[in-house]
Amino acid sequence: MAKKILVIEDDRDVAKSLQAALVRFNYQVSMAANGEEGLKKIIADTPDLIILDILMPKVDGYDFLVTLKETKGRGGNVPSIPIIVTTAIADDSIREMISKEEICAYFTKPFDLKELLDKISEIIGKNE
C-alpha cells in the first residue's frame, strides 16, 4: 500500500512540483493550501508524513503546529505524524521551532528535491 504524504503549501508551483515528484516515486499525495485545510485533511485521512510550509495565509505553519499539538494534548484522534518543514526562513527562529515541535527535518527554499526525497525515504521508507 502506498505511503500517504500530505503537502501543506500555498505556492502552487512548489506544490505542483512536490506532488509530481512524490507521485513519480509512488507516494499517495494529498494537498492543502494552508494549515486550516491541512488540519481537516489530517482528521479525514491520517497521512504517514506531512511536508509543511511555514509562511501561508489563514493558518500558517507555526499555528498549524500549535493546533496539531493542542489537538493531540486534548486526546484528539490525531496520532504522531512525522513532519518535514520547507521554508524560505533561514534564521534561528526556525531552528528553535524545530527543536520545540519535534520536526524531523527542514529544508530552506529553494531546496534540493533529491535531498528531500532521500529524507522522506529515510523517515517513512520507499514505496515498492
Image (cartoon, helix red, strand yellow):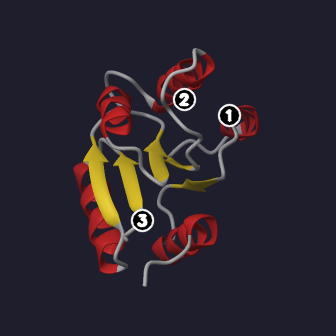
The amino acid marked with disc number 2 is: Leu
- Relative side of 121 to 18, left or right: right
User: Residue 75 occupies which quadrant of the picture?
Assistant: top right
The residue under label 3 is 3
The residue under label 2 is 65
Q: Report how far apart the C-alphas of labels 1 and 2 lie in the structure.
A: 7 Å
The tag earlier along the polypeptide, 2 or 3, is 3
Q: Are marks 1 and 2 in contact (CB under 8 Å)?
A: yes
Q: Report how far apart the C-alphas of labels 1 and 3 lie in the structure.
A: 23 Å
Where is residue 56? Give x, y as percent: 37, 32
> As displayed, is residue 99 above or below residue 63?
below
- Relative side of 98 to 71, left or right: right
**Quick one: 110 or 85, which is closer to the camera?**
85
The tag earlier along the polypeptide, 1 or 3, is 3
- Disc 1 on helix, strand or loop? helix
Q: From the image, which quarter does the N terminus lie in?
A: bottom left
> As displayed, is residue 14 above or below residue 118?
above
Give me the residue at 40% from left, 57% from top: 5
Where is residue 24? Give x, y as percent: 30, 79
The residue under label 1 is 101
Where is residue 8? Give x, y as percent: 37, 43
**Quick one: 8 or 126, which is closer to the camera?**
126
Q: Report how far apart the C-alphas of labels 2 and 3 lie in the structure.
A: 22 Å
**Quick one: 114 or 5, which is closer to the camera?**
5
The amino acid marked with disc number 3 is: Lys
Give me the residue at 50% from left, 72% from top: 117
- Relative side of 27 to 75, left or right: left
